[in-house]
Image: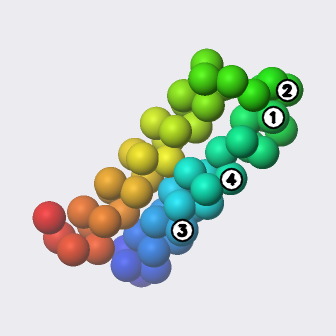
Amino acid sequence: MILTLSVAELLLGLFINIRIGRLAVALFRKDGTSSRLPLRVLGIFLLINAVSRIFHI
């Protein structure tokens, strides 16, 4: 169960970081550094947590 959630979290983090431009425009109606920063932080946070939970670091 935890492994499945961790893999989903990893995929969501990757999706956010890959599609950050489109997500910034869809959520904040503008594209720039200030609108991308919360998405970038969220994506990196999800990636780090997922990897650490999968590999038990």
| Chain-order first, disc 2 or disc 3 | 3
Kind of element beneath mark 2: loop
Disc 1 residue crowd, few under 14, some 14–19, many 20+, Cα 10 Å: some
| Chain-order first, disc 1 or disc 4 | 4
Q: Check if mark 1's residue and mark 4's residue have beta carbons within 8 Å.
A: no
Which image quadrant is residue 31 in? top right
| Residue 11 in picture, x, y percent from top left | 54, 68
Q: Which residue is mark 3?
A: 11
Kind of element beneath mark 1: helix
* Residue 52 in view here: yes
Q: How far is the residue under mark 2 from the one under mark 4?
A: 15 Å
Kind of element beneath mark 3: helix
| Chain-order first, disc 2 or disc 4 | 4
Amino acid type shown at disc 2 = Arg
Kind of element beneath mark 4: loop
Disc 2 residue crowd, few under 14, some 14–19, many 20+, Cα 10 Å: few
| Residue 50 in picture, x, y percent from top left | 36, 63
* Residue 29 position (above or below residue 39): above
Q: Which residue is mark 2?
A: 29
Q: Check if mark 1's residue and mark 3's residue have beta carbons within 8 Å.
A: no
Which residue does the image show at 58% across and 37% down from the upper left? Answer: 39
Amino acid type shown at disc 4 = Arg
Q: Which residue is mark 1?
A: 25
Q: Report whether 19 appears left or right of 5.
A: right
* Residue 5 in view here: no
Q: Which residue is mark 4?
A: 19
Q: Check if mark 1's residue and mark 2's residue have beta carbons within 8 Å.
A: yes
50 or 32: nearer the eye?
Answer: 32
Amino acid type shown at disc 3 = Leu
